[in-house]
Amino acid sequence: MRLEQCLPLLGLLLCAGGTTAQEDEEQEREFLVEISGTTVTITCPLEHESIRWELAGKVQDTTERKLILKDHDSAPANLSCGEGTGKRQLYLNARVCATCEELDALTVAGIITADLLITLGVLILVYYFSKSRKGRASAGGDSRPRGQKTQRPPPVPNPDYEPIRKGQRELYAGLGPRGI
């Protein structure tokens, strides 16, 4: 078969496979968990009129899609919601905080931007202050001339490390390598 003849068949297969995947997504919705302070709100993915909630084996007194847990103590819990055979289960391990403040994304972005601008400002200040101090003479009593480099005299030879002269070779001749 040629490629031109296979493309329509391939397109039909992809369309059929895509619709079944969308149907599976509708059946496999996820729980929605919202945390605010010490209150945890959980929304059941099933869309029944009366939903039965169970928290750690105890039936809750609400039949709505949303279960609101006030003053949650951050203890892990097993939850289930549903009706009859269509039950969905959730392991809830939510950390809550009574004294925490909620920040929106704009506030966090503003804090990060301000921090970067302050850091950049300090960097520029340090650069300009260090640049202006380069040309100044130091405040200490430096007596070295700042002009051209003067030649230094050769180092004073140490008599302990003088080279062996021709007349003294016999003195060191007996220090040859020893056979072990």
Image (cartoon, rainbow, N blue to C red):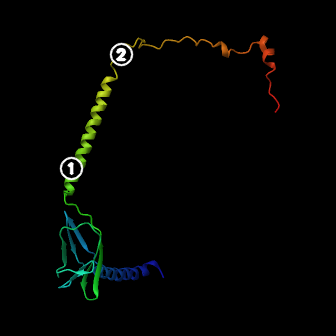
Foreground of the two, 9 or 34: 34
Q: Which of marks 2 and 1 is in front?
A: 2
**Mark 2 and mark 1: span between their CA atoms?**
46 Å
At 45% across and 13% down in the image, what residue appears? 148
Q: Position of residue 139 (x, y in %)?
A: 33, 16
Residue 127 vertical position relative to residue 4 in the rendered view, above or below: above
Q: In which quarter of the image is residue 133?
A: top left
Residue 173 vertical position relative to residue 55 in the rendered view, above or below: above
Foreground of the two, 13 or 100: 100
Which amino acid type is shown beneath numbered disc 2?
A: Gly
Residue 151 shown left or right of residue 8 in the figure: right
The residue under label 1 is: 110
The residue under label 2 is: 140
At 30% across and 24% down in the image, what residue appears? 132
- The mark that comes first in sequence, 2 or 1, is 1
Residue 162 shown left or right of residue 116 in the figure: right
Which amino acid type is shown beneath numbered disc 1?
A: Gly
